Image (spheres, grey):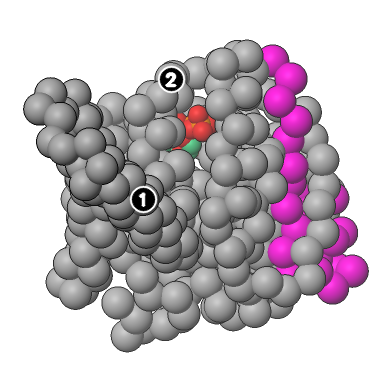
Amino acid sequence: MEELTVSIIIPAFNEGNNINRIHKELKKEFSSLRYDFEIIFVDDGSEDDTLARVRTLALEFPEVKYLSFSRNFGKEPALIAGLQHAKGGSVIIMDADLQHPPSLIPELLEGFEEGFQQVVARRNRVKESKVRSSLSSLYYKLVNKLAQVDLVDGEGDFRLLGRQAVDAILALSEGNRFSKGLFSWIGFDKKVVKFDNVQRDEGNSTWSLVDLFEYGIEGVLSFNQRPLRLVFYAGFFIMGLSLVYILIMFGLILSRGVEVPGYFTTISSILFLGGVQLISLGVIGEYVGRIYMETKRRPHYLVKESNTERETYEEME
Ligand code: UDP
Ligand code: MG
């Protein structure tokens, strides 16, 4: 590990047009800093010329390291891969699309020098579509109610981690990663630096609304068993209600005799309870599915090509 080196980790999926730009900006930024830097590009199975560009860049500039996955594994595995190969005393995680302004790096490093293990860049939501930002804020409200970790709106993956924090993250071996939650879970002293939201101008965001929705579910489920508890209470509540209903009906039958119709009530209770059962099964299924994935202990990613070696946690799965 090199104390005065900062490892910049950049996951890249079809970011061919951004590779040279971000390298240039980072180089400019670091020219006035007393830190050395290495860039670790993690090519997440891109289908464009991302790998070729990164390879060319690495031939010319020794600070450029890269890993290329055998297929698209997703941003989370790309982040772990980057962290596992980082040699610096601190690590900065940023996107390839320049939505995370490199000009913020001096401020992040200042925080690190003040002794913070996590320096987080928090963006506001200017220039973002109304739908997306209101969905996001709704989501954060929900997650913070349900989960036992604190997530803050606007705090993404753009952050600096000190070596202690990096090693803590690497020690968490779960396969279903939700790094926003993990960053919050490990704790350590945290400083927040603010910046204005930037739109990407090359390529497209690869997240559809459905992706975001699934990512949201991941966030709720990977951090607690509360949904299971909720289902349990719901079941209890409904059972109570039906008991009251049955007693009343029974009383009525005793006093007035059997009333034939009853079709409506039968059907509605079957449908309602059927729904509740399906939801419960779904929730349980989600957890069981996660257990199933974890028991396979598959590696988080497979590397097809690279010019760097894994530094820490040699034997980590
Ligand atoms: N990314 C990745 N693998 C994926 C999807 C995205 O490595 O499967 C990278 C992408 O290249 C970018 C970062 O993750 O550097 C953020 O992606 P994007 O800009 O699409 O997300 P957004 O900014 O819209 O959240
Ligand atoms: Mg982006």
Category of crowding for the residue at label 2, using alpha-carbon neighbours closer than 10 angstroms: few (below 14), some (14–19), many (at least 20) = few
Q: Secondary structure at mark 2?
A: loop
Q: Relative to 138, is 218 above or below?
A: below
Q: CA distance from mark 1 to mark 2?
A: 56 Å
Q: Quadrant of ligand 1?
A: top left
Residue drawn at 31 percent across, 65 percent down: 175
Residue drawn at 74 percent across, 42 percent down: 122
Tag 1: amino acid: Val
Which region shows up in magenta? 105-127
Q: Position of residue 3 (x, y in %)?
A: 70, 77
Question: Quadrant location of the C terminus?
Answer: bottom left
Camera sees residue 155: yes
Q: Position of residue 60 (x, y in %)?
A: 48, 46
- Residue 27 counted in the magenta span: no
Q: Nearer the viewer, residue 79 or 221?
A: 221
- Is the residue at mark 2 in contact range of ligand 1, meaning its CB lies under 8 Å from it? yes
Horizontally, is 198 left or right of 281 in the view?
right
